[in-house]
Image (cartoon, rainbow, N blue to C red):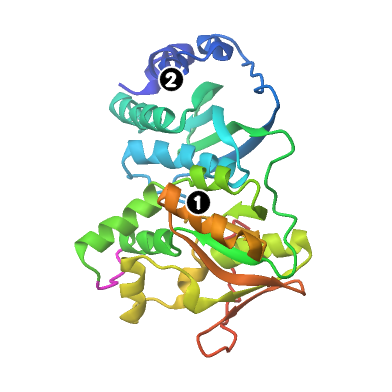
């Protein structure tokens, strides 16, 4: 049975209303709006991301991982603001092939991640579409008043840091497309998982509220996203390519000549945090990495200028003209 054989409200009541339990402002998804109140002494952070089948995920990806990616890319945006997730609304445009089995698995993925990230569904919209599956989430988070991290604020002399490892999701996409990277199954599985189910760095984002001067999450590629910081902060950024952290799979593919360093630095979907902080914060950032058990690596510095330059091990500029993913 497909959702088209249900009325819209029956579909919402069966699949989505259970995700709103325990959130009074959701009204059981029986109203056409929700109500939220920020915690005392906090600001509300709002972010929206849309993912589309054939653009951000494969149409035959497991429904649970599609749900997780849709939610996690928004949670990652909240992490980059130093915010704690609170609630979200979901707009789902469902094509005919989506059936009850698919929806059940999709909702199970949302339920697992809601519990993990402490976030609840409070509303949205569900429609049929002849086009590809499209999911749009708007997420709300809380941050102590005046403490939201922004892209603007980096200063010449600051260090540039990144969490986790870079280029994994792009390699995972290549694995799914059938590219031969000459990797073990273990490495390939790890890379595919990074593409399908990103890992929002909430603990790091909250931990650097008082340390970072500028921050964002790496969604379009490390170089492209650092250019956003450079542009709005009116500074330049110099990256030392040899310092950029790679996973075992990424390092193996690079060492074997199956992928270029430029590809890794410009691939999207990593959802790691990149940020600028004063050199005086180095010890506190290292302590934070130890507490959160998340790798955080200093990869360069903020300089005068307006561009991002990547230097190879011999000091020569590395060509990164294709800065990263763009829709248009």
**As drawn, 40 above or below 142:** above
Q: Is residue 202 magenta?
A: no
Q: CA distance from mark 1 to mark 2?
A: 33 Å
Q: Secondary structure at mark 2?
A: helix
The disc label shown at residue 19, or none:
2
Tell me where residue 103 appears, x and y as whole percent. 35, 27
Q: Which residues are magenta?
A: 178-182
Q: Is residue 179 magenta?
A: yes
Picture mark count: 2
Quadrant where the image shows the C terminus: bottom right
Q: Give the class, few, some or many, for how many residues have Cα within 10 Å of label 1's Cα (few <14, many ≥20).
A: some
Q: Nearer the viewer, residue 5 or 178?
A: 178
Residue identifier under label 1: 288
On the image, which quarter does residue 192 sit in?
bottom left
**As drawn, 277 above or below 261:** above
Q: Is residue 313 visible?
A: yes
């Amino acid at each position: 049975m497909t959702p088209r054989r249900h009325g819209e409200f029956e579909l919402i009541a069966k699949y989505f209303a259970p995700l709103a339990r325990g959130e009074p402002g959701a009204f059981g998804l029986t109203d056409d709006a929700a109500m939220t109140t920020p915690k005392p002494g906090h600001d509300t952070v709002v972010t929206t991301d849309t993912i589309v089948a054939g653009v951000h995920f494969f149409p035959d990806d497991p429904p649970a991982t599609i749900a997780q990616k849709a939610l996690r890319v928004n949670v990652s945006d909240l992490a980059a603001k130093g915010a704690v997730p609170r609630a979200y609304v979901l707009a789902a445009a469902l094509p005919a092939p989506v059936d009850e089995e698919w929806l059940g698995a999709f909702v199970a993925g949302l339920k697992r991640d809601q519990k993990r990230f402490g976030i609840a569904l409070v509303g949205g919209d569900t429609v049929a579409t002849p086009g590809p599956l499209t999911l749009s989430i708007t997420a709300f988070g809380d941050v102590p008043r005046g403490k939201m991290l922004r892209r603007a604020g980096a200063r010449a002399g600051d260090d540039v840091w990144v969490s986790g490892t870079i280029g994994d999701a792009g390699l995972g996409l290549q694995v799914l497309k059938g590219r031969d990277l000459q990797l073990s199954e273990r490495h390939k599985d790890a890379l595919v998982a990074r593409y399908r189910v990103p890992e929002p760095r909430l603990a790091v984002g909250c931990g650097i509220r008082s340390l970072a001067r500028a921050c964002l999450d790496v969604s379009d590629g490390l170089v492209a996203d650092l250019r956003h910081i450079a542009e709005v902060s009116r500074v330049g950024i110099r990256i030392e390519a040899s310092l950029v952290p790679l996973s075992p799979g990424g390092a193996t593919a690079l060492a074997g000549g199956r992928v270029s360093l430029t590809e890794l630095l410009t691939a999207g979907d990593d959802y790691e945090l990149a940020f600028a902080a004063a050199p005086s914060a180095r010890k506190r950032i290292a302590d934070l990495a130890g507490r959160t058990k998340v790798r955080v690596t200093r990869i360069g510095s903020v300089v005068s200028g307006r561009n991002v330059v990547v230097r190879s091990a011999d000091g020569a500029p590395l060509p990164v003209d294709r800065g990263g993913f763009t829709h248009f």
